[in-house]
Image (cartoon, rainbow, N blue to C red):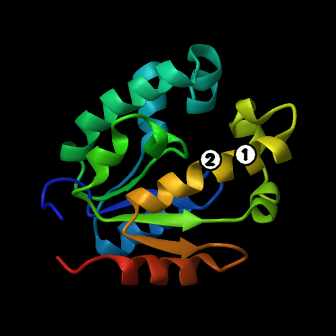
Amino acid sequence: MTTNGPVLVLVGPPGSGKSTIGRMAAERLGVGFRDFDDDMAAEHGKEAGDLVVDLGRERFQQLEHELLIRVLPQHDGVLALGGGTPTAPGVPDLLKPYSVVFLDVDLDHLLKREGLVALHPWLLPNPRAHLKQMLADRRPIYTQVADATVETNGRDPQDILEDVLAAMPVR
């Protein structure tokens, strides 16, 4: 693990709890929190879901990679990546020096998340089919980039936080 950059990077599908758990972890660790989707929106003037629709996945992932190169060395707190960010070409290599935890969630629990489809218009017209395929495609990548996996299905955020913190290597 490196000493420059985030103390913790959270990965997982949209709706897995990265932002919620990330804020809680940052507070507990006494560091800042950063949501990479917010960085993308600030940088490009649109929410990440809209950017994917407007630019296409390939161009969006190029922009994610470019921004992540700048963000990683600047932020020394907790970083919640966008759901698709780890799948962007080159991103797994960028994450290697950092403590990465995969927040895993199953399809049924994702579908219960209010507002998920509104935040991610690319899920339409069939959110269940899109989410099922997305989980199948991304789970191996999340597992590959992560040092640990924490299940979030139906669990209290405080319990998830404890598991995330326990999974972090001692620095």
Label 1 residue SS? helix
Q: Is residue 160 above or below residue 116?
A: below
Q: Is residue 45 above or below residue 165?
A: above
Q: Which residue is mark 1?
A: 133
Label 2 residue SS? helix
Assign the N terminus to one quadrant of the image: bottom left
Dot 1 alpha-carbon crowd within 10 angstroms: few under 14, some 14 to 19, many 20 or more: few
Q: Residue at x 14, y 55 (%)?
A: 4
Tell me residue 38's x, y (percent). Answer: 47, 38
Q: Nearer the viewer, residue 39 or 93?
A: 93
Q: Is residue 129 visible?
A: yes
Q: In the shown orientation, is residue 144 left or right of residue 123?
A: left
Q: Is residue 118 above or below residue 18?
A: above
Q: Residue at x 44, y 45 (%)?
A: 86
Q: Quadrant of residue 30?
A: bottom left
Tell me residue 59's x, y (percent). Answer: 48, 19
Tell me residue 44's x, y (percent). Answer: 45, 20
Q: Is residue 12 visible?
A: no
Residue type at mark 2 is: Asp
Q: Which residue is mark 2?
A: 137
